[in-house]
Image (tube, rainbow, N blue to C red):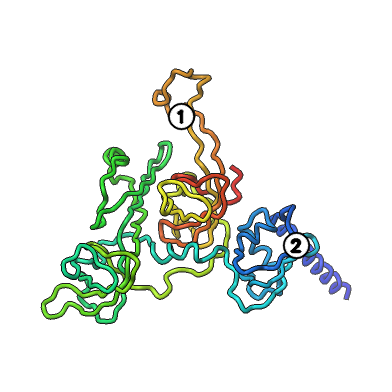
């Protein structure tokens, strides 16, 4: 009997120790804001990111709050009407409210849906069927008109296709042993071939495809249509009736099968699964802008699924520190080009904001700028959201 009581006592001590460790880990991981409200009723139009920002120093850790509440059936979802209140030890309790409305998402889907529908990244497109001619030999065709497609020998009436246009080529130039890698964004012509760019010309000449990796080709959706006739009776092109009012179709546009649901509808913020090599994760482009964006702007990123990135991954965005000439040491008259790179002073990176990934491809991804203290620019570095510098 004494032995049983001893084993029971040891077991209770083990359970108690594990419980203390769990509470301590939770407290270390989740830092509450000092100005948080005592009670909040979730409203229609709220986002999880904004709500978590009311309670936490780090909004991307909001699942830690929900998972501490066993009364929530799905710890990832809360709804309008739910009451969020602070429990003892400054922990957060969520009391379920009515469930008539849709759950609250991390970001409003309406803000990224055009990019989810209209943009995708592929490794290549040369194999895709393409528009070879248009009704009445037009230069452009739109809704209600016909496009003639080559490369669909087995097309059947009733099949649906999206018409897409290659617009950008993204590349990564590995310059191991030098100051930094280079990332390029090249415009494409109507055939999807690269347009010569004087800005990148000499770099491409000096370092032709050696170490130059294509991260992907961006395809923009321009229209959609239904096959009305295949390649029959000696005709070498299938007929596509355009039925979307989005953009005009031109010769050279490509076709892809219409996906029923090609993207996620909800995004759960979380830190990246692994530490990324410095200089490898960069902002490649800012959608609908030249080089600069701010909160709720969409950015293209140089990393994807192969680096462990998935939808909901949160990064902090940093302006890369300059390499400055020490004017005290070299004098004001010394030109920057005469000072070797290794002799320059590397200045600290500067924090700009946070970005949340909402669509992931193999080597690239798209993200939404969630908050910022300064503009996000092409070339800025991506780091773990907790990175101190």
Residue 387 x %, y %:
59, 47
Q: Which mark is residue 342?
A: 1
Q: Is residue 90 visible?
A: yes
The residue shown at (42%, 61%) is: 361
What separation in Å lies between label 2 and label 1 (alpha carbons)?
50 Å
Return the residue at label 2.
Answer: 91
The residue shown at (72%, 72%) is: 95
Q: Is residue 384 visible?
A: no
Above or below, 102 against 218 in this view is below
Decide which of 105, 80 is in the foreground and name it.
80
Q: Is residue 51 left or right of residue 144?
A: right
The residue shown at (64%, 54%) is: 58
Residue 78 x %, y %:
64, 70
Helix, strand or loop at label 1? It is helix
Decide which of 259, 111 is in the foreground and name it.
111
Q: Using a 10 Å C-alpha cutoff, classify the residue at mark 2 as few (fewer than 14 neighbours), some (14 to 19) or many (20 or more).
A: some
Q: Residue 352, located in which quarter of the rendered image?
A: top right
Helix, strand or loop at label 2? It is loop
């Amino acid at each position: 009997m004494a032995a049983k009581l001893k084993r029971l006592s040891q077991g209770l001590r083990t359970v108690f120790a594990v419980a203390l460790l769990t509470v301590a880990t939770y407290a270390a991981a989740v830092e509450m804001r000092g100005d948080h409200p005592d009670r909040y009723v979730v409203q229609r139009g709220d986002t999880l990111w904004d709500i978590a920002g009311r309670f936490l120093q780090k909004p991307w850790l909001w699942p830690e709050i929900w998972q501490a509440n066993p009364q929530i059936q799905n710890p990832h979802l809360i709804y309008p009407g739910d009451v969020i209140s602070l429990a003892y030890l400054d922990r957060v309790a969520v009391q379920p409210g009515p469930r008539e409305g849709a759950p609250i998402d991390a970001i409003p889907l309406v803000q990224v849906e055009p990019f989810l529908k209209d943009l995708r990244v592929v490794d290549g497109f040369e194999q895709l069927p393409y528009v070879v001619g248009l009704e009445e030999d037009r230069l452009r065709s739109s809704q209600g008109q016909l496009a003639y497609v080559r490369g669909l020998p087995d097309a059947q009436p009733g099949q649906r296709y999206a018409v897409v246009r290659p617009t950008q080529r993204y590349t990564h130039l590995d310059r191991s042993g030098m100051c930094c890698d280079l990332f390029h964004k090249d415009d494409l012509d109507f055939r999807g071939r690269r347009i010569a760019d004087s800005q990148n010309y000499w770099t491409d000449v000096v370092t032709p495809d050696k170490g130059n990796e294509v991260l992907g080709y961006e395809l923009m959706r321009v229209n959609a249509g239904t096959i009305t006739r295949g390649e029959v009776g000696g005709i070498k092109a299938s007929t596509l009736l355009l039925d979307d009012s989005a953009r005009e179709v031109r010769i050279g546009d490509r076709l892809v099968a219409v996906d029923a649901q090609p993207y996620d509808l909800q995004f759960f913020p979380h830190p990246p699964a692994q530490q990324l090599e410095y200089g490898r994760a960069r902002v490649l482009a800012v959608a609908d802008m030249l080089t600069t964006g701010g909160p709720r702007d969409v950015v293209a990123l140089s990393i994807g699924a192969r680096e462990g990135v998935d939808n909901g991954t949160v990064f902090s965005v940093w302006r890369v520190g300059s390499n400055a000439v020490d004017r005290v040491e070299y004098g004001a008259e010394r030109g920057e080009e005469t000072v070797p790179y290794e002799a320059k002073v590397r200045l600290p990176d500067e924090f700009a904001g946070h970005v949340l990934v909402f669509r992931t491809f193999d080597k690239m991804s798209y993200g939404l700028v969630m908050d910022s203290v300064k503009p996000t620019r092409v070339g800025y570095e991506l780091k773990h959201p907790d990175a101190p510098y």
